[in-house]
Amino acid sequence: MNRNDWASPPIMETLRRALEEDIGPGDVTTQACVPESRTARGRFLAREPLVLAGTPLLPLIYRLRGGVFDLVFLKQDGDRCEDGEVIAQVYGRAHTLLECERVALNFLQRLSGVATAARLFADRVAGTRCRVLDTRKTTPGLRLLEKLATEAGGVTNHRLGLFDAVLIKNNHIAAAGGVRHAIERTRAASGLPIQIEVRTREELREALDANAERLLLDNLTPEEAADWVREIDGRATVELSGGVTADNVRAYAEAGADFVSSGAMTHSARAMDLSFRLELA
């Protein structure tokens, strides 16, 4: 993924919907008490230590409303921020700054929460050969944004959806009639590398005999994972998943996995504390 993804049509539509949801036919408070012609300056501030994500959305949000004349970033996505540090400064119509305040903060807080959680996972496996992957356990409608945030936090993006990578899971195996059938049918139908989830030693050996390129080992303890990795002996790359947390991710990485994945970085990330302060220009 790259910075151009931030301005992709799906994200722009998400921003439009978010602004429409919040502003509706108009900000009645701002219209009532702030002169239309007034200009102002605003500052986005971190209110706790965090890893920043979502800054490329700010110019897009303001562009959709109009009336912003200057936007300066003092921090970029992936930067660590301390309590009280200024992230960005903006100058424009007071109406625009007030209308966009909550939508801008909602995205920055949510995505910085994801990036902060991702950085914790990435830091915990530092010095090993293992890489951390994100998952599809994302907020519906916000997947691309949340995956851009995990990337800002130092984590490797896994597949974006069902359309860009093959991952044969337990229900596919059941529907296909077994591990070998699933692999052989997939290999004949798709030119993509094959990853398959295996849950028993029997399934593991069947997958290796069928020359699976990549194995997903689910819900093993770190000790069990290390034993399975020894049996695999480099014949396929190994991803470990299921029950992986920031507290135990190092143990899973040291079990010999090439990858570990965790949905906690997205489905359980908390919004970080950021604020917006406005003053007359």
Image (tube, rainbow, N blue to C red):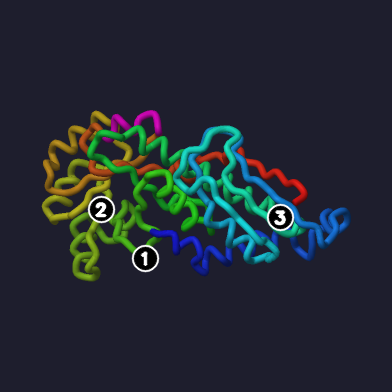
Q: 112 or 60: which is nearer to us?
A: 60
* Mark nearer the viewer, 1 or 2: 1
Residue 135 placement (x, y as % from top left): 40, 50
> Which residue in the structure is indicated by mark 2?
196
The image shows residue 242, relative to residue 55, as above or below, that is above
129 up-or-down from 179: above or below: above
Magenta-colored span: 246-253
The percent position of residue 201, horizontal first and vertical second, equals: 19, 41
Q: Closer to the observer: label 3 or label 1?
A: 3
Tell me, yes or no, whether the two marked residues, 1 and 2, touch with CB atoms within 8 Å: no
The alpha-carbon separation of the residues under discs 3 and 2 comes to: 49 Å
Assess whether mark 1 and mark 3 are in contact (beta carbons under 8 angstroms). no
Residue 38 horizontal side relative to residue 231, left or right: right
Could you tell which of marks 3 and 1 lies nearer the N-terminus?
3
User: x%, y% of residue 211?
Assistant: 13, 55
Separation of marks 1 and 2 at Cα, in angstroms: 16 Å
Asked whether 103 falls inside the magenta stretch, the response is no
- State the residue position of label 1: 163
Query: Residue at label 3?
Result: 97
Q: Is residue 16 left or right of residue 182?
A: right
Residue at 70% from the left image edge and 64% from the top image edge: 67
Number of residues whose C-alpha sits closer than 10 Å to that of mark 1, classed few (under 14), some (14–19) or many (20 or more)? few
Residue 20 visible: yes
Seen at 31% across and 58% down, the residue is 172
Residue at the spot 38% in from the left edge and 62% down from the top edge: 162
Is residue 249 in the magenta section?
yes
Q: Amino acid at mark 2?
A: Ile
Look at label 3 and name its amino acid: Leu
Picture residue at 55% right of the left edge, 39% below the top: 270
Q: Amino acid at mark 1?
A: Phe
